[in-house]
Amino acid sequence: MRVDIKRLKSNHKQILNLKVAGMRDKDIATALGMSPSGVGLVVRSPLFQEALARRQASVDERVDEAIVDEVVTERRKAMDILRENAASAAATQVKLLTEGSASVRLRASDSILDRVFGRAPQQGSEGEGKGQVVINTECVQLLQLAMQESTESV
């Protein structure tokens, strides 16, 4: 049975709005100048219950969409910041590789290799999975870009 919200009286619509907002029956009664038993009678009616369920589902859906949109936006911002910082870090590593002392070049190259060809987490105690190489393609791309930029500026 589909509820036509237009069939609800105006004070029922007010009760519905306040109920969706999270107010208790007693507080609704006070706000609307009604008796708590009168509000309770309206709230317990099947017509009202169905309208309330539909409205709450609609509100929940909009809230869920807003949360998802916010999470996606924040994730995009975080990824942009990481990419910017990764490019800068890669450029610094390239500079250290080409301009630093021998010990600095060695540490920079070790650092790059650790990031680009990171070791997979060790699995099991029998040694299975140890020493597997995992290639981080995004690091490789950033490193290549930084190397190109540094050779172009020379």
Image (cartoon, rainbow, N blue to C red):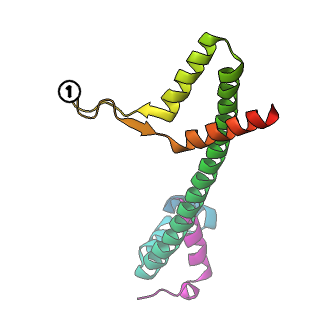
With respect to residue 60, does 119 lie above or below? above
Question: Three-letter amino acid code at disc 1?
Answer: Ser
Residue lying at the far right in this picture: please name it. 153
Query: Mark 1, residues whose alpha carbon is within 10 Å: few (<14), some, or many (≥20)?
Result: few
Q: Give how far across and how far down residue 51 sits, in percent.
A: 49, 78
Magenta stretch: dominant secondary structure = helix
Residue lying at the far left in this picture: please name it. 126
Location of the N terminus by quadrant is bottom left
Res. 148 image quadrant: top right
With respect to residue 147, does 7 lie above or below? below
The magenta stretch spans residue 22:
yes
Q: Residue at x 45, y 82 (%)?
A: 47
- Secondary structure of the residue carrying tag 1 is loop
Residue 146 visible here: yes
With respect to residue 14, does 128 lie above or below? above
Q: Residue at x 63, y 43 (%)?
A: 78
Q: Give how far across and how far down residue 32 sits, in percent.
A: 62, 67
Q: Which residue is mark 1?
A: 125
Residues drawn in magenta: 1-23
The answer to whether residue 72 is left or right of residue 54 is: right
Location of the C terminus by quadrant is top right
The answer to whether residue 39 is left or right of residue 84 is: left
Q: Give how far across and how far down residue 123 sits, in percent.
A: 26, 33
* Foreground pick, 129 / 98: 98
* Foreground pick, 141 / 42: 141
Q: Residue at x 28, y 34 (%)?
A: 129
